[in-house]
Image (spheres, grey):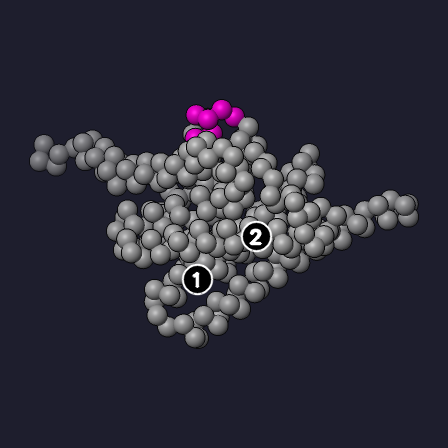
Amino acid sequence: MPAAAQRGLWPEAQDTCTSLGLMLTVVLSVALARGLLRRHVHGPAAHAFVLEGLATFQLCFCTHELQLMGEQEPGHPTWPLTLTYFFSLVHGLTLAGTSSNPCGVMMQMLLGEMAPEAGAARLLAQLVAALGSRYCVGALWGLGLTGYHVGERSLACRNPIHVDLPKAVVVEAICSFIFHSVLLHCQEVRAKLRIHMLAALITFLVYAGGSLTGAIFNPALALSLHFKCFDEAFLQFFIVYWLAPSLGILLMILTFSLFLPWLYNNHTPNKKE
């Protein structure tokens, strides 16, 4: 390869390494904080609140950086999808015991697996961490550590919705339905295999719906990524990124808890006959 071409590639590789280094630093910092939390915080409510906040902060920060890296080469999605799979694995391995997603908390509450008070505390932790990660990202990008880190960029609204409102609602609802259905029904699968399954599923959903709505299916993450858009077009973004994933959860619970059992009972031959 000519020396000039190598010099042209070096800044891009350096920027990529810097972004990856930032994300891994946050992952390691959160892991350290979780370890300190286990030693020094013993109240279950406070423990769960801080854990959920740390997990949501890590998820949002890394997704901000992944989204930024993906925008540098929009015509070559393989690298961003590879990173999506890899960091989904990292989150699955390092954030055990947390959901980092208001829809996950909502699912647990509706299934009776979590008390409303505990669920409300976790939701609050997620929202605070989501907004906190946004401002931390803006501050870091303002330092100009890479060629594409610009502080003002984090304040702009970059609308990820490229379809009309009904289609956007369907996309986010279906993504939420599929992901949480798999999450609910693969609890008996070995942990190592389950993490790979969920990471592959997230990558597939991002590939399938990313060009339509971003395939976020996480209200806290959507708020962190697109806070300015919520400010400018609140109703549209509230419907797509808050109501639609919640609708997916409700449909999932109704399907597996009521409709399918009813269908099975009504089509099972009566043994007495």
Q: Nearer the viewer, residue 155 or 193?
A: 155
Whether the magenta-drawn stretch holds residue 39 is answered as no
Label 1, residues with CA under 10 Å away: few <14, some 14-19, many ≥20: many
Q: In terms of secondary structure, what is the magenta stretch mainly?
A: helix
Outermost residue toward the right in this view: 3
Q: Residue at x 28, y 46 (%)?
A: 110
Which residue matches tag 2?
135
Quarter of the image where the C terminus is located: top left
Which span is picked out in magenta?
A: 163-169
Q: Earlier in the sequence, mark 2 or mark 1?
A: 1
Nearest to the eye among marks 2 and 1: give it. Answer: 2
Tags 2 and 1 touching, CB below 8 Å: no
Which residue is depicted at the point 69% across and 34% down? Answer: 75
Give the residue displayed 44% in from the left and 75% down from the top: 39
Dot 1 corresponds to which residue? 51
Q: Is residue 173 visible?
A: no
Task: Classify 10 Å Cα crowding around label 2: few (below 14), some (14-19), many (20 and above).
Answer: some
Q: Quadrant of the N terminus?
A: top right
> Horizontally, is 81 left or right of 103 in the view?
right
Q: Is residue 257 above or below residue 24?
A: above
> At label 2, which amino acid type do we have?
Tyr
Q: Position of residue 30 (x, y in %)?
A: 53, 63
Q: Given the image, on which type of amino acid does mark 1 rest? A: Leu
Question: In the depicted view, which residue is nearer to us: 105 or 269?
Answer: 105
